[in-house]
C-alpha cells in the first residue's frame, strides 16, 4: 500500500484514485499518523457485500434450546429485622 501525506494527496488526487484502482488501497497520513484510506469501488463493494442484518446475526448465534440453570438448594441466611 502506498502512503500519501494529505497535502500531496490533495494536489495529486487523480493519481491517488488511479493507484487505488490499479494497485490497491492508498493510505493518507496527517502529521505522520494514518488518517484515511482510499479504496477502489471494487474493494469497497467487496468489504460491504457480506453485511448480515441484526436479525440474522442474532439468530446465527449459539443455540441454547436445552439451556438449564441449576439452582443451589441453599435457602440463604437468616436476617434479623
Image (spheres, rainbow, N blue to C red):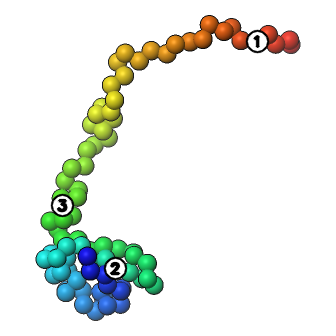
User: Could you say which disc has been placed on residue 77 in the image?
Assistant: 1
Label 3: how many Cα within 10 Å (few below 14, some 14–19, many 20+): few
Separation of residues labelled 3 and 1 (CA atoms) = 61 Å
Q: Residue at x 45, y 15 (%)?
A: 68
- The image position of residue 70, as x and y in percent, is 52, 13
Q: Is residue 81 above or below residue 63?
A: above
Q: Earlier in the sequence, mark 1 or mark 2?
A: 2
Residue drawn at x 30%, y 38% as measured from the top left: 57
**Cα gap from disc 2 to disc 3, whole angstroms:** 20 Å
**Residue 79: quadrant of the picture:** top right
Q: Residue at x 56, y 12 (%)?
A: 71
**Above or below, 57 relative to 17:** above
Q: Position of residue 25 (x, y in %)?
A: 24, 73
Which element is circle 2 on?
A: strand
Question: Element at badge 1?
Answer: loop
Q: From the image, tell me which residue sits under label 2.
A: 28
Q: For the N terminus, which image quadrant?
A: bottom left
Q: Tags 1 and 2 in contact by the CB under 8 Å rule?
A: no
Measuring from the top left, give residue 28's x and y in whole percent: 34, 79
> Which mark's residue is nearer the viewer, 2 or 3?
2
Residue 14 seen in this snapshot: yes
In this picture, residue 22 sits left or right of residue 28 = left
Q: Which element carries disc 3, helix, strand or loop?
A: helix
Can you identify the residue that label 3 sits on? 45
Q: Residue furthest right?
A: 81
Amino acid at each position: 500500500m502506498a502512503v500519501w501525506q494529505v497535502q500531496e494527496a490533495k494536489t495529486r488526487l487523480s493519481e491517488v484514485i488511479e493507484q487505488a484502482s490499479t494497485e490497491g488501497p492508498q493510505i493518507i497520513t496527517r502529521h505522520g499518523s494514518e488518517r484515511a484510506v482510499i479504496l477502489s469501488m471494487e474493494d469497497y463493494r467487496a468489504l460491504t457485500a457480506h453485511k448480515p442484518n441484526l436479525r440474522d446475526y442474532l439468530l446465527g448465534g449459539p443455540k441454547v434450546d436445552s439451556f438449564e440453570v441449576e439452582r443451589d438448594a441453599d435457602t440463604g441466611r437468616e436476617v434479623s429485622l
